[in-house]
Image: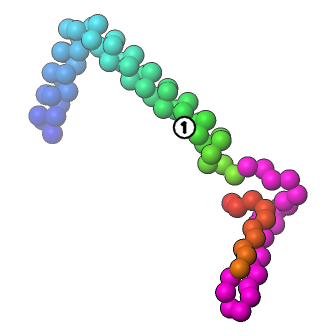
Amino acid sequence: MRTLFQDLRFALRTLRKNMMLTLVIVASLAIGIGANSAIFSVVDALLLRPLAVPGTGPSGCRLAAFSCNRHLTRLAISGSVR
């Protein structure tokens, strides 16, 4: 645990000596985190959340299967999957 604190103090001293490097590091981290958050928000809104389908109520999803001679011929799903 003692060496961890020594390493942290050494890192802070080194970053304090090189202020320009510190600013570049902090700026690149901020831009990367911001871009990652923005891209995830767009992907979440467009792809991950279910789209609103007109005519579906709070009951959710309906599943109907039609079989002919014990073989599934058609599978119909209506509504939104949650």
Q: Residue furthest bottom?
A: 69
Q: Pick the quarter of the image with the C terminus.
A: bottom right
- Relative to residue 60, is residue 29 depicted above or below? above
Quadrant assignment, res 56: bottom right
Quadrant assignment, res 7: top left
Lateral position of residue 63 relative to residue 40, left or right? right
Q: Is residue 58 magenta?
A: yes
Query: What coloring was used for the rendering?
Result: rainbow
Lateral position of residue 46 relative to residue 6, left or right? right
The foreground one among 47 and 82 is: 47
Residue 17 screen position, x and y as percent: 20, 8
- Relative to residue 38, is residue 11 depicted above or below? above
Q: Is residue 2 magenta?
A: no
Residue 68 screen position, x and y as percent: 74, 88
Q: Pick the quarter of the image with the N terminus.
A: top left
- Going 12% across and 35% down the picture, which residue do you hit? 2
Q: Residue furthest left?
A: 3
Q: How many marks?
A: 1
- Going 33% across and 13% down the picture, which residue do you hit? 24
The foreground one among 2 and 67 is: 67
The foreground one among 55 and 76 is: 76
Where does label 1 land, which residue? 40
Quadrant assignment, res 42: top right
Residue 12 screen position, x and y as percent: 22, 19
Residue 66 screen position, x and y as percent: 76, 81
- Relative to residue 79, is residue 21 depicted above or below? above
Lateral position of residue 27 relative to residue 78, left or right? left
Amino acid carrying label 1: it is: Phe
Q: Residues within 10 Å of mark 1 (few under 14, many from 20)?
A: few
The magenta stretch is 51-72
Disc 1 secondary structure class: helix
- Going 45% across and 28% down the picture, which residue do you hit? 33
